[in-house]
Image (spheres, coloured by chain):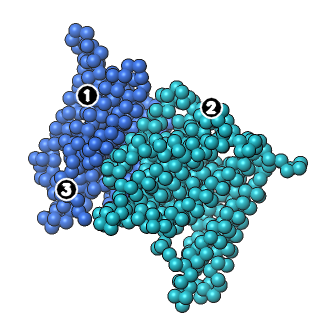
Amino acid sequence: MTQVLSRVPAFAVAAVTILLGLAFAIVFMEQESDVAVISLVALAAVAAWLGTRAGVADRVSAAAVERPGSIALLVAAAMLVLIGVFVEDHFPLLMLATVMIYGTVALGLNIQFGYTGVVNFAGAAFFGIGAYTSAKVVDSGLPAILALPLGAIFAALIGLLLVIPVVRTRGHYAAVVTIAFSVLFKTFLEVNDTLGGPQGLSVGSMKLFGWDFGDSPTFGDFEASFYLNYALAALVMLALVFVLVRRLERSWLGLSLDAVRLDETGAACYGIGIRRSKIFAFVLGNAIIGLAGALYGSMQGYVAPTSFTFSDSLILVAIVLLGGMGSPWGTILAAAIVVILPEKLQAIQEYRFLLFSAVVIAILLFRPAGLLPRGVRHYFPPLRKGAEP
Amino acid sequence: MDLLGQYLINGLMLGTIYALVAVGFTLFFGVLDVIKFSHGDVLMVGAFTGFTAASAAAAIGLSHPLAQLAATVVFALAGTAVLGAVIAKWLILPLKTAPRLNILLATLMLGTALREAVRLFYPDGSNPKAFPALLPTTAWQFGNFTLRADSAILVVTGIAVIVGLHLVINRTRLGLAIRAVAQDEETARTMGINYTLIVLVTFALGSGIAAVAGVMDGLYYNEINFGMGLLLGLIGFSSAIIGGLGNLYGAILGGFLFAALQMIGAVAMPFASAYKDVFAFAVVIALMAWKPTGLIPERSSDRV
């Protein structure tokens, strides 16, 4: 099997895998019964295991190294097709948009955790800052589209308050700073009246060049779900952030961030500014999280403190670890699993947090590197072709 | 004056509970260099075990409050001690070489699992339970200030537990072994110390102390619920950190400091006493900026 596979171009293997994944996603999203959902999950697990054994996974990652741009475009196209299939249904579109928003957040956290090793257990708090900003911006009569950049800016600015303790502390001491901030933020929202207290605020819908995101787009006599607007916006946002993260990883900046994570003393010896790198990663990550939060607030139509608790921050951290630290593709896959699976398993809704925590513990025990572990850097992909037999 | 006295006794009470939780974090960090974040939820399990024991004791006809109290404390202690050792054996020791973040997340998730398990599987677990008032409720009057016997007993018990732990750590062979393991695992092994056993005993000890804190919390507020462990665990962790990890006195200092901050927040900002937790956590963040390794820093050197 492996020999046969090695004769097929890696890109073709990857393309077929992505198509199969798309077909699976379409079938999976349509299932209603728990038996079907659970058997499909089991099927996916078996297929993933067999695929790894047969060497498909290696070929796919080889393709991702050789032609990263084409693979990314292909996945984006597959996402578009997926959105297109469910264009009339509110719930699947809402789920897809949520996956992409959470994926964006996890990419932001990835810059902090995965590259630089700056721990952030307040992801949901910065996400909440973005969401509350969008509520306030729409409320104040400013153009609603400003909510996105302002959400990012506010999250970054409020994150700056934490910069001194985050930069000075390490390890567990750093964890407590963001954990304390996470609890502080939620308590603050609950007791602050101008931010709506425990009830939260309602968010007006977003408008772009006179196009209201709350309206359903109509094409002739065909009417799509209004979540189509948000799903497309989330896809664009995710794609842009993904490109940014990949560029960052490949740049000298990404290299110095990695150095800071792996060995602070060593990095300092080579003249890398430890503090500067940490501040850069922390602020950039928070800005990305805030941007995603602004879109999320606008999509949900309301913001309340209960959506931005410490437990939500934990779920975000779990996405990053589950996908594999520093692995953007793994992050997005993990976001899809973490968001969609509990929603699809409605009958075991009661037990979903219990199951979820059990699954994360099992992964940490048996596959600590995550689902799609980050590979070694490949700076010169074309040269490798000739090098390999 | 009377109000201030009330705040003082309240702060002492909370400080004792926080210190008991923080001491557990410090013990675990001492022997294994790990943070066991499920500690708060182990505390909650202890409180529920105690509650069950008290109800069971009442059901089989033990009507004397002291007998019920004894059953509560014994079962809560034993239950959580076993739970703590099981967690150490099956979750924390296997992850010992994993990155710190993985252990932190695994134990956080275990905390969620414990919380959810109590909520789902304990009879009517999603609703708060009225913890029986097992302590005498006589009150002494000093001028305007009322001192309730139950608060006094709880504070004295808590301080006695802390002193007892101090004696165990510093004056017994077990304590010597724990300190040896905390200082250097390999050397401790070569000296004939059963490493795994000591780790398990330490986790049992720390978890048992958390159960005491949980029962105290239940007796003080007369109510327990499945979510009580989350905030108590977070506060205990913050206390252990601001005191300085790996230092017993740091944890105690941190616990009382956190309670003091909450009380200052409540007293000094009468217009906004709802912000007392915001204030306390903000001060924690500021303290971390000022003293990045806690008020009483670890004595270990930076190993490169």
Within 10 Å of disc 3 (Cα), the crowding (few <14, some 14-19, many 20+) is few
Which residue lies under the disc numbered 3? B300
Residue A39 relative to residue A247: left or right: right
On the same chain: label 2 and label 3? no
Which residue lies under the disc numbered 2? A140
Q: Colour of chain B?
A: blue
Q: Nearer the viewer, mark 2 or mark 3?
A: 2
Dot 2: what SS? Answer: loop
Within 10 Å of disc 2 (Cα), the crowding (few <14, some 14-19, many 20+) is few
User: Which image quadrant: the C terminus of chain B?
Assistant: bottom left
Query: In the image, residue A235 lies at what x, y percent?
Result: 66, 56
The residue under label 3 is which amino acid type?
Ser
* Residue occupying the point 43% across, 39% down: A183
Chain bearing tag 1 is B
Identify which residue, A111 or B12, lies in the foreground: A111
The quadrant where residue B33 appears = bottom left
Mark 2 and mark 3: span between their CA atoms?
54 Å
